[in-house]
Every structure is written in C-alpha cells, then in structure tokens.
Image (spheres, helix red, strand yellow):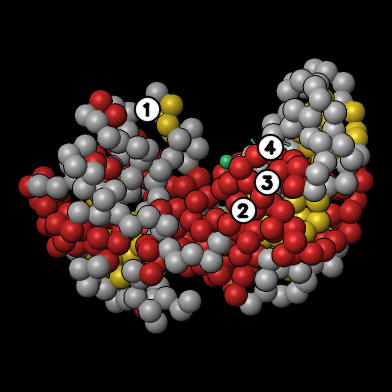
C-alpha cells in the first residue's frame, strides 16, 4: 500500500490544503481532550517548516440543521491550535466565499488558516457528506496540493477528502495517515508470527466482519468482552442476562466451524446479578444461569490468553475484555494489557475508541507500538475493505 506522503511534495510557497481530524470532544465550548489536535501537529509543522501555507479543513460532530451548528464551530479548535503551534492562526467562520478566499490570498509562507467545520455544508443538501462534486472542486481550487491526514474519516467518501482528491490535485498522505496505514496495513498484510488478534467490546455486529477477515490471517483469535456470549450461545451454552446478539448466533456458529481451534473463547467469567460495582461478584465456568450476567473474563481466561500472547510477534486488539469502567470488571482488560506490556519484540496495536481509552485510563498507553485513532476506519481496514479516503491518495 505504497502511497505518496507529504515528504514527496515540494511545499515551498505552496498553498497546502490539509484535511485533518479535529473532531474533538467539546463541552460548553471547551475542548475536553485535545489529543486529536496534537496528533495533527507533525504534519502541520512539516508543511509550515518547509515553506508551505497551511489551509486546514476538518469536520466536527454531526451537523444536519441550522440549530446543529451551535457549539460545532471550529473556532475553539483554531484557538487551541494556535497555542500548541505557538503562532497566530487565522480562523475563517465560513466554508466558502470571499472572506475565506481573501484570508488564503493574504497567507504568507509558514502561516495557517483554519476553515469552518466542513459539515456546515451538510445543512443545505449534505454537500460534504454526500461528496457533492462542486464542493470538492471549489475547495480544491483554493490550493495547489492536498494532504489528507484524517485517517478517522478515511472510510467515508466526503467532499473534504475524496472530493478534493478526485479533482486531480496532487494528493498525498500526512504523517498520521501514513502511520495508521503502515501499522494496521502491515500487521494484516505481512504479520510477524505468531499473530494474535484480540476482540471484545460490546457489539458483535460491528466486529464480526473483522473476525471473518482475520481467520485466514491470524494464528489465534482471542474473544472476550461482550462478544463472548454470542459465541457461547452458538455453542449451545446458556448465558443468563449477559449481552447477546441473537441475530448473530448463526454467523458465530459458522465462524467457529471455519476457524477451528484458532478462535479461543473465555473459559471463566466474572458474573454479577446487577450491572453495578456495589454487589459481590462470582467467577463461573460453563453455563450462566438466569438472573446473572457476565461482565468480565475471569482469572483462568487471563492466564490462558496471557500464555497465548507470551510468544506473539504481532498483536491486534479491538474491544475491552470487560466493563473496565467499573473496577470490579476491569481485571480482564488489565491482565491482557499486562501480558502485552511484557512483550519485548512484538508489534502491538490497539484500536477503537473505548479500547484506546481503556489502555490510557489503566496506564498502559505507552506499552503499545500503536494506538489507532480511527475507530470505524481501523475496523474497516481490519475487515480488508478499501477505504475511499485512502484509495484517493496518489500511489508512490
Ligand atoms: P471500542 O470502542 O474499543 O471499539 P466497543 O465500543 O465495541 O469498543 O465496546 C466497549 C464497551 O464494551 C465498553 O464500554 C465496555 O464497558 C463494554 N463491555 C465490555 N465487556 C462487556 C460485557 N461483558 N458486557 C457488556 N458490556 C461490555
Ligand atoms: Mg466504542
């Protein structure tokens, strides 16, 4: 998957359109987590240091009506970016028009413009999200080259990524995009073996495609978290009140048949009568009775999974092993984090919003080779799908 990157461009005196992912959480106009802004800095700094003028585009949240615009402006993001860059950043409260064009015309080398939330264009006919060709063409006309660094939206064909790129403007990947495709792409295309995939979390339906694609690739697939019970049901076990997706049971049966002993399920479960941290828990193996639910993998499973992980050379993990937000059900996720932290010679990747948050909160973030920032995009890459945003970047 050799794509051109920002290093393949001559940026001097160029108007460089950069699609970044500034989709940060905001509460009452205050940014509660600026990780995504920080993650875009290497590409922005590279453009500025090499004499380019940076024109930044991003979406923020979902905007379908005029009312949705409230609290979705990129103004606070532009301000925070200015602080992080240590330089003036011009914010244009428009997605098109004279003010934007004038701000770009006035840019000098090394200066930055942030364009208003691209999804403000969705209020009138979903122009951004439906990839209106006129909009992509207009935005492309504002610059000389295009850098796509928004991995998190690479699985969508929107005007601000695919639309701009498909006008034929030179299109390259930014450093964040490059890192994501390198880590995830290499891990599934040419994994160092043994390759172990770990899947958990709450929604089987979101991740079943990943399991299907990984069966021929991985040496072992460990299943924990809320996924466990759909697979238990497929094996004819009872799961009590645990999370189960009945319409995926047949598929789980097929996957079990196809994967043979590659799929490893939890052998014990931390159960509770209530979704709460305040009632005593019981570790159980086998059938789970009515009135009881499983919220974490048990200690024997942590031992089993840790043993399998001990000689792994590639680990891909998506979905927590239990309800890690409650301390009674965090030990499974902590145990698997510890097993991964002990690996010295492995490429280890964790992806998914809650999974990344778990690694962060539990204090293991620095133990992974790569924490993927794009939930949906990383899942689709793991499913073996072509990401339109990625496909639209020029090949090397
Ligand atoms: P990600 O965001 O990493 O893709 P998901 O959104 O699929 O992960 O799942 C994360 C959520 O799954 C967490 O909030 C966690 O509490 C929940 N979860 C994990 N195990 C269970 C379980 N056994 N029952 C119910 N929820 C679970
Ligand atoms: Mg999630």
Q: Residue 388 versus residue 253: which sits nearer the camera?
A: 253
Q: CA distance from mark 2 to mark 4?
A: 13 Å
Q: CA distance from mark 2 to mark 3?
A: 11 Å
Secondary structure at numbered mark 4: loop
* Residue 281 in picture, x, y percent from top left: 87, 26
Q: CA distance from mark 3 to mark 4?
A: 9 Å
Query: Which class describes the residues within 10 Å of circle 3: few (<14), some (14-19), or many (20+)?
Result: many
Mark number for residue 308? none
At horizontal 14% and vertical 57% (from top left) the residue drawn is 134
Label 3 vs label 4, nearer the camera: 3
Query: Which class describes the residues within 10 Å of circle 4: few (<14), some (14-19), or many (20+)?
Result: many
Q: Residue furthest left?
A: 98
Q: Which label's residue is closer to the chain start, 2 or 1?
A: 1
Secondary structure at numbered mark 3: helix
* Residue 180 in picture, x, y percent from top left: 52, 63
Q: Which label's residue is closer to the chain start, 2 or 4?
A: 2
Looking at the image, residue 371 lies above or below residue 239 = below
Q: Residue 20 versus residue 312: which sits nearer the camera?
A: 312
Classify the position of ligand 1 by quadrant: top left, top right, bottom left or bottom right: top right
Mark number for residue 29? 1
Q: Quadrant of residue 329?
A: top right
On the image, numbered disc 4 is attached to which residue?
A: 244
On the image, numbered disc 3 is attached to which residue?
A: 249
On the image, numbered disc 2 is attached to which residue?
A: 208
* Residue 206 in picture, x, y percent from top left: 56, 48
Q: Which label's residue is closer to the chain start, 3 or 4?
A: 4
Q: Is residue 327 visible?
A: no
């Amino acid at each position: 998957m050799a794509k051109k990157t920002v290093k393949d461009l001559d940026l001097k005196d160029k108007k460089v359109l950069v699609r970044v992912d500034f989709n940060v959480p905001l509460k009452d106009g205050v940014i509660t987590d600026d990780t995504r802004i920080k993650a875009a800095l290497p590409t922005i700094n590279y453009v500025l240091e090499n004499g380019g003028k940076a024109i930044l585009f991003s979406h923020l949240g979902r905007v379908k009506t005029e009312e949705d615009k409230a609290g979705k402006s990129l103004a606070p993001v532009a301000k925070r970016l200015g602080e992080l860059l240590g330089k003036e950043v011009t914010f244009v409260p428009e997605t098109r028009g004279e003010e934007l064009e004038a701000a770009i015309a006035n840019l000098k080398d090394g200066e930055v413009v942030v364009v208003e939330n691209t999804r403000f264009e969705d209020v009138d006919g979903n122009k951004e999200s439906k990839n209106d060709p006129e909009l992509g063409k207009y935005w492309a006309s504002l610059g000389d080259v295009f850098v796509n660094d928004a991995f998190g939206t690479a699985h969508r064909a929107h005007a601000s990524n695919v639309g701009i790129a498909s006008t034929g403007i030179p299109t390259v990947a930014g450093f964040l995009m490059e890192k994501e495709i390198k880590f995830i792409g290499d891990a599934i295309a040419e994994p160092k073996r043994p390759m172990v995939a770990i899947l958990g979390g709450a929604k089987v339906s979101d991740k079943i495609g990943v399991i299907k694609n990984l069966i021929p690739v991985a040496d072992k697939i460990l299943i924990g978290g809320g996924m466990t019970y759909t697979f238990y049901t497929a094996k004819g076990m009872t799961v009590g009140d645990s999370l189960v997706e009945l319409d995926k049971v047949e598929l789980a049966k097929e996957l079990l048949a196809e994967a043979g002993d590659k799929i490893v399920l939890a052998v014990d479960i931390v159960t509770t009568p209530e979704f709460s941290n305040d009632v005593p828990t019981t570790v159980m193996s086998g059938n789970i009775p009515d009135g009881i639910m499983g919220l974490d993998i048990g200690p024997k499973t942590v031992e089993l999974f840790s043993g399998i992980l001990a000689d792994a050379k590639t680990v891909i993990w998506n979905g927590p092993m239990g309800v890690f937000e409650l301390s009674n059900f965090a030990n499974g996720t902590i145990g698997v984090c510890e097993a991964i932290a002990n690996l010295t010679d492995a490429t280890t990747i964790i992806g998914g919003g809650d999974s990344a948050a778990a690694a962060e909160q539990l204090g293991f973030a620095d133990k992974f080779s790569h924490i993927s920032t794009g939930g949906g995009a990383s899942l689709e890459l793991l499913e073996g799908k072509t990401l339109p945003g990625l496909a639209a970047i020029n090949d090397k």
